[in-house]
Image (tube, rainbow, N blue to C red):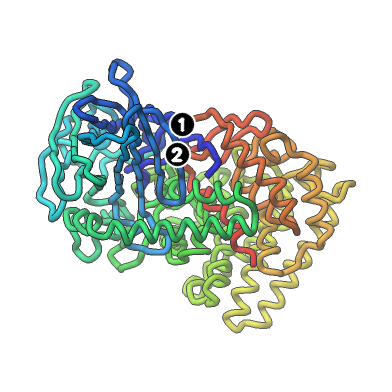
Amino acid sequence: MKLRPPATPIINIDPYFSIWTEESVLKNTIHWTAKPNTMYGRVFVDGEEYHFLGQNRKSKKPVMEVEDTEIDAHSTIITYKNDVIRLTVHFTSPTLVEDLYYSSRPVAYARVSYESLDNKEHDVKVKFLASEELVLNSKGEGIAIGDPVDIDGVTAIRMGNGVQKVLNRCGDDVRIDWGYFYLGVKGEGVVGHTIFDAMYAVTAEAELKNDALFLFAYDDIESIQYFGENLKAYWKKDGKTIEEAIAEAAKDYETTLARCNDFSDRVRKEATEKGSEKYADLLLLATRQVMAAHKLVVDSECNNLFISKECHSNGCAATVDVTYPSAPLFLLYNTELLKGMLRPILKYDAMDEWVFDFPPHDAGRYPWVNGEVYSIKRPEMIIKTERQMPVEESGNMIILFAAIAEAENDASFAKEHIESIRKWNEYLIKYGLDPETQLCTDDFAGRIAHNVNLSIKAIMGIAGYARILERLGETAEAEKMMSKAKEYAASLVERARNSDGSSRLAYDRPETFSLKYNAVWDKLWGTNLFPEEFYKGEIERYKKEQLIYGVPLDSREKYTKSDWLVWAASLADNKDDFNCLVDRLWLAYNTMRSWAPMTDWYYTDTSHMRGFRHRTVQGGLFIKLMFE
């Protein structure tokens, strides 16, 4: 990867078990929230101590120079050197999207090896130190306690809060303070505990003969509160313990790493063929972030639930307009995970307390999935309709059902929920052609009436419903709905046309523009609702409007959204135009000085982050791979 990432992924399992480095020189380890999540790496060469991960500013110990960093979908390989050795640390978080168990198992690796640079033999030992910040919301908020644990084939120690209050809090800018962190080394090693930087820490040390394999794990005991019931992670569904999971992980490292490498190779190859090496870089950097913004659990009825966290926004759980842009990754590689993202919304929508003819925005605030918090205040249950996203979420849900049916060549999942889909479609027919002033997923840019892109979403929702009906054998109704979608599309093209052939931000705002990312489904499904002149006009306008770091979201501001930029670029009929637009996104991340996991909201003239970090919506960058 030639991209210099704005933050480097180290351990990335779920919204809580998250370790990044905020600088390319790898000095400090942080949680995705930017709060400290301190872990240190030390190497001892013939008794001389060197620092390679995490730099205590008060320490006078020498620091190893970073020679190279290579990042793919599941691994970060960092090469360090000093005058006598080259040290290679291969971090891997194997949250494999194609495998439910591995996407859930909370175990990460660091394989460490070295080579001599002075042609002499050396006595080399490596030590990892993990601070109390991994098990407390912030250091000092509780008392962390560590003790050795007995794990087959692994020398290990665990650390946890001395007072365990499982699932005691929810919110966005919070860290976990329940459960236990595990640190170990495969085979022989030494574990212990210490105090550094006024914090308690656990340690694991191993001698490097050829290499050593360190393991990092987190058992959160219970992961999600789901409508009053506390649920365990998917990996526990057959009664497996964390000790068994760690022992298993130590044994299957080589095969697991091979699977991770295979996935990375496939993504790199296809992304390069359909876009460029720069596009491939973006997908490889996004994968771990997207997977680690979710938690896979199983409810009492054995349904898989893949709960997203709306990171760096309001902490909402199972947010529909976050699921929608993230969907391409899961439509490509595992539709069951996408279904698991929709099930909480479907459950809540079916409850008596949800009184609307459109879907809810969310199903809770992570990790409490007990009903929408975006606009409903508990316990008074005051419903604020102006905070809802009626057209937005109706279109999102129907399009996602239709996309799943396309991916699986089977509409069974949609059939299970067809009455809800019919209800939402009726709402789109009534209000979708020319939406009133209401929120949409781009609410940060301000709500507007007559939103053309929102109207396109409604049209694609109606078309998606028609395609579902066609698969279910309701041919007459399917033709009726597709005719309605075509009627609306023709009206939109005529009413939204600018003089240059592009389309407006809003029907009543001549010569404005916006990214018409919702039209990508027309291209993917081949429904041909919008003429080629429409798409040609859009791409030419985007090329005209783009600044050094990308195309603005619309005429009002210079900021953009990464997911929507790639969706809009995918409207292009040729690879050159796609790359022309997406290469600017690569440049933005490569030059960004806002040290954070891939933001999706930044300024196209400076590349400065406007807001949002560690968002699941980066799964949307994969959309180009959905094209044949």
Name the quarter where the C terminus is drawn.
Answer: bottom right
- Do the residues under discs 2 and 1 have CB atoms within 8 angstroms? yes
Residue holding disc 1: 24
| Residue 352 visible to an observer of this rendering | no
Q: Position of residue 82 (x, y in %)?
A: 35, 28
Identify the residue at image location x=30%, y=68%.
301
Label located before the other in sequence (2 or 1): 1
Residue depicted at x 80% and y 41%? 544
Q: x, y percentage for residue 384?
A: 52, 44
Residue type marked 1: Ser
| Residue depicted at x 40% and y 33% | 21
Can you tell which of label 2 and label 1 is closer to the viewer? 2
**Mark 1: few, some, or many residues within 10 Å (few <14, many ≥20)?**
some
Q: Position of residue 406 (x, y in %)?
A: 57, 71
Q: Give the number of the disc on residue 60.
A: none
Mark 2 to mark 1 CA distance (whole Å): 9 Å
